Amino acid sequence: MRRSKTIAALATVLAASSVLLAEQPVANAADDQGLYVAATAYTFDGDGTPAATTDYFSTGDANTTSTAAAATDTSCTDKTYALKSWKVGTLTWLYNGTGVPTTVAGTALDTIKAATTTVAKGTNRCGLPTSTSTTSTFTYGGTTTVKPQVASNGTCTGNDGKSVTGWGALPTKVLAYTCTYYNARGVVVASDTLIDNVAYTWFTTKPANCTGAKYDLQTTLTHERLHTAGLAHVDQAKDPAQVMTPASAPCDTSRRLLAAGDYAGLKAAASATK
Ligand SMILES: [Zn+2]
């Protein structure tokens, strides 16, 4: 009996590793507490130069991908999603406003709460039913001085048992970075998100005539919360309307709410038995 449990645990580690290898740059480690950690980065074209066509950089390589506007909006027809190896049971998250950019200092927390609620309820662009029973999946626990355990080089630095969202420096092209710890049953025990406060300009209300390297905080946090909830990236070019593309474009606010694939993925992650 004990032997089979050990084998099951090893299988979990291997499964997590294979996911992570496909999604660089990430750090991963299994500690001796039986917890696993995975990191997910949200990236984009970081040169800030307005361009006729927007190029995205996929995580882990420098290849550009054509992102010409789709002929039709695939928000509600593309049901593609990919899953991580964890799901959220109940998670209390904290906010550390140290280092918040002055441009969003007064609005950032409410915007992060809104993005979190979008994921908790499954609020979407497609008229699909939202859930009231899962609103307690993410609970806001107040502000904290505890720092998110994400290093400026984009590595996870440990698990203090607290799920903190905050601000700091991140590697080039990375908008935000989430480190998620989950147990052997695949249930998240902590998830830290660090938002860049050095390289990029954030907005919570889209500026008129938006140009340059300005990014929507709500879209980014919706993306990060979906990672925490167990979603992985979809294809940047094939699934451009989903929140879970690896990259985001400047001034884009079209993906604050879930597309059909994000929604389907959220349901699948929540109902998965681990
Ligand atoms: Zn991501």
Image (cartoon, grey):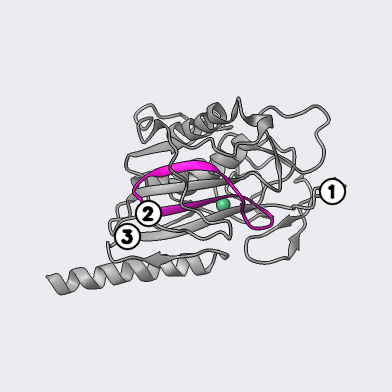
Residue placed at 61% from the left, 38% from the top? Answer: 219
Residue 251 x %, y %: 74, 38
- Checking the image for residue 49, the label placed there is 1
Residue 180 got which mark? none
Tag in front: 3 or 2: 2
In the picture of the structure, the residue carrying the numbered disc 2 is 159
Does the magenta segment cover residue 176? yes
Q: For mark 3, give the secondary structure.
A: loop
Q: Is residue 175 above or below residue 110?
A: below
Residue at the disc numbered 3: 35
Instruction: State yes or no: discs 3 and 2 in contact (Cβ < 8 Å).
Output: yes
Q: Find numbered disc 1 in the image and state the secondary structure of the residue it sits on.
A: loop
Residue 237 as seen in the image, left or right of residue 153: right
Q: Quadrant of the N terminus?
A: bottom left
For the residues labelled 1 and 3, the Cα–Cα distance comes to 42 Å
**In the image, is residue 186 above or below residue 13?**
above
Residue at left offset 47%, top offset 45% = 147
Q: Position of residue 143 (x, y in %)?
A: 44, 32
Residue 255, image x, y percentages: 63, 38
Q: Residue at x 62, y 37 (%)?
A: 217
Identified by mark 1, the residue type is Thr
- Marks 2 and 1 sit apart, C-alpha to C-alpha, by 37 Å
Q: Is disc 3's CB within 8 Å of ligand 1?
A: no
Q: Is residue 189 left or right of residue 227?
A: left
Dividing the picture into quadrants, the one containing residue 125 is: top right
Along the line of sight, the residue nearer the viewer: 37 or 197: 197
Does ligand 1 reach within 8 Å of label 2's beta carbon? Answer: no
Q: Earlier in the sequence, mark 1 or mark 3?
A: 3
> Circle 2: is it few (<14), some (14-19), or many (20+) Cα within 10 Å?
many
Q: Is mark 1 within 8 Å of ligand 1?
A: no
Residue 204 x, y percent position in the rendering: 65, 30
**For the residues marked 3 and 2, what is the alpha-carbon distance in whole angstroms?**
9 Å
